[in-house]
Structure formats: C-alpha cells, structure tokens
Amino acid sequence: MARPQPAARPANPRFSSGPCAKIPHFSVDMLSDAPLGRSHRAKVGKDKLKSAIDGTREILGIPEDYRIGIVPASDTGAVEMAMWSMLGARKAEMLAWESFGAGWVTDVVKQLKIDAEVKTADYGHIVDLATVDFDNDVVFTWNGTTSGVRVPNGDAIPATRAGLTICDATSAAFAQDLPWDKLDVTTFSWQKVMGGEAAHGMIVLSPRAVERLESYTPAWPLPKIFRMTKGGKLIEGIFVGETINTPSMLAVEDYLVALDWGRKVGGLAGLRARADANAKVLWDFCDRHDWIANLAEDPATRSNTSVCLKFTDPRITDGAAFAKAVAKRLETANVAYDVGAYRDAPAGLRIWCGATVEASDIEALTLWLVWAFETEIEALAAAA
C-alpha cells in the first residue's frame, strides 16, 4: 500500500546547488532593460557592467582599494586566472576538503608543476588551518560546495603573511562574512547565492595581489583570457567593466536585478540571515531524526548554503543506491529537483539553502524527506 504523500508542497522545488534558484517571484520580464543586440563596449554596455561591479562592492563591503573584475568561465575561470597568473613566485600550499579544491590541486601540481605542499581533509571536515604556513601562497575554498563545510572565520590567517591567499568563495559570497583583509584573491560566480546565470565569474584583488601581478611574470605562457597585465601594469579597464571577452548582457541584467533584490532584503546581513534561517531548518530536522545527519560534523564548519546530508539508518546496506532512489522519488513528485549528492562526494543529498530559497519551502521539503525515506525503507523490507 502506497504511503500517503504530505499535503504541503514547496512552492519552488528548485534546490540545485548550481545554477541555483532564481530570486523569489522572478520573471523574465524583469530583464526587459537588457541592452540586447548592443555592443558591450558601447556606453550602455559599459555602464551596465560598471554597475555590476559597483553593486558587488556595495553589498559585499569590499574595500575601495580592491579591484573587482568580471571574467570568463564562471568561478572556474576566475580561479584558474589567479593561479596561472600569480602562482610560482614562492612555494604554494594547496588545501582541499572537497572535489573543487581537489581540482585546483590537480591543476597546480600536475599542470603548472609548482612546488606545492598539499593538505587534505575528508568530506565533512576541513584542514586544520593552524598547520598552514601563510608565508606561502595558499589556495583554498571558503565554502565546500560538494561537502557542506566552510571556513568558520579568517582568524587563522595572519595579517602579516608574506604569501597570497587565493580563495574560491563561490558558494560563500553573499551568504557568509568574508574577511577581506585576510583574502588577496577572491573568486565567485553569479549562479550561486544570487541565482544568476552561468558562465560569468568575478575576481577580487587586494593591493597585495595587484603588486604580485605587476612584479612577477610566470614561467609559462598565459592564454589571453588569463592576462590581467600589459607591459608590467594592471589592465585597469578589466576592473571598470571592460571585459576580456564578450559577456552576455542578458546575464548582466539578471545579475543587476538580483543585486537590487539583495538590497531590498537588507544587503549582506539580510542575505546571510535568509541562508542561516534556511540551513537551520535542515539542521533542526537532522536533530529530530536519527536516520539522517549533516555530513559536516563540526557545527562551526557547517555550510549555510550547500547543506549536505547523509543517511545513517543501519537498515540501509547500499547507501548510494538508497540516496539515489530518494532523490529520484522527490524529483518525480515535483517537490525537489537536483538534490542528489555531487558525483565525487559521499552518498547522500545536497540541498541548496542560499538566500534565494524560501524557508517555507525548506520546511515543506522536510515532510517529503520523511515520506521518501520511509517509502524507500518499506521497499527495502518488501524486497528482503
């Protein structure tokens, strides 16, 4: 006999961790001011791009002497640009606690072949930052999108460091406090917390990062899309909206709309509070049920955006198959799309809780999590 489904349903079943849910009540009509068919180098295009940069600085509280650029290939392109342009001047330390951080390790060690010390932690944990020598260049993710962990604060990063800190903050920007004085290069993408469209990345450079760019030339050739200097000087145009390659002005307009919504909900404090409230619904849910748990074991390092969950019931003998069946059941019921764990992560679920998601939808989803779990457990018993 089929188990009855919950009466309440999420109004928006989109819980993907990227691209993430659009802002509440989104409509393509909101993008009617996009200068489609116009050059991004025309005044209207440059003004829109400059507004995206200025709005980013305003909401995130980025210092005035930091440069902000819109770059190709999403967060991935921004991280690669930083590593290919700046690493190699001194020894590097590569920190990895999930799949994207591991990808940066591969690029640095196997592709760039840089002298690097690699420090890793299992999924659900982060590296002990007290063991890191910040006189080296350090590359790390602030929020582990695929493992549900985050750096709790910047206290371990000394103000007097000699090396650069290169931080992939793609699931943290607009949802967590980033200590700008501790970060020399920070990257993120529009399609995460702000629910923007893919393919556009942001790179934020401290004065120390600019100094490295202007004083160091890598031993390897740089593709055009990675070049931030010319004749030993920073290409300032990149940081006022003169992008390296052609951006989508439709995507730019979408980002501007999202930034305006961010202002209306209270800026960074409001965006962070929304993500915190969303994540707390799931954390409290795990505390009430002994068959599911947060993959991030230390509450201090739990992400408030990409919340990763694991099933702990002893009756489950094939965790991967069980989690896949639960995710499929939720999608078939049209209550949660794209909530399976990342392909390289431990079996389980990954539910996006960034600011564009409504807490009421997370609340409704928890009822369906119970339904899907109990339905699959019954199926296991029937098959035994």
Image (cartoon, rainbow, N blue to C red):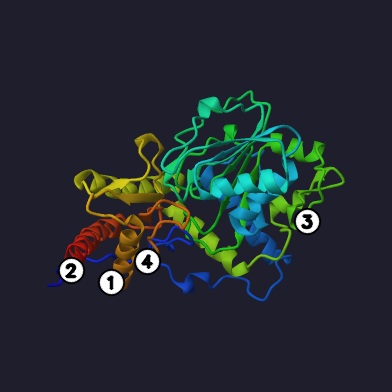
Give amino acid for label 2. Answer: Gln
Between residue 247 and residue 141, name the one nearer to us. Answer: 141
Does residue 343 appear left or right of residue 105 in this picture? left
Give amino acid for label 1. Answer: Ala
Q: Is residue 271 above or below residue 73?
A: above
Residue at 25% x, 59% y: name it: 369
Q: CA distance from mark 2 to mark 4?
A: 17 Å
Does residue 99 appear left or right of residue 266 in this picture? right
Does residue 233 appear left or right of residue 350 in this picture? right
Quadrant of residue 232 in the image?
Answer: top right
Residue corresponding to mark 2: 5
Residue corresponding to mark 1: 333
Sequence order check: which comes first, mark 3 or mark 4? 3
- x, y percent for residue 112: 73, 46
Badge 4: residue crowd in 10 Å (few <14, some 14–19, many ≥20):
some
Sequence order check: which comes first, mark 2 or mark 1? 2
Give amino acid for label 3. Answer: Pro
Residue at 48% x, 44% y: name it: 143
Between residue 133 and residue 7, name the one nearer to us. Answer: 133
Does residue 314 appear left or right of residue 126 in this picture? left
Q: CA distance from mark 2 to mark 1?
A: 9 Å
Sequence order check: which comes first, mark 3 or mark 1? 3
Question: Which mark is on residue 223?
Answer: 3
- Residue 335: in sight, yes or no? no
Q: CA distance from mark 3 to mark 1?
A: 46 Å
Question: Which mark is on residue 98?
Answer: none
Residue corresponding to mark 4: 337
Q: CA distance from mark 2 to mark 3?
A: 54 Å
Seen as rendered, the residue at the extreme left is 1
> Tags 2 and 1 in contact by the CB under 8 Å rule?
yes
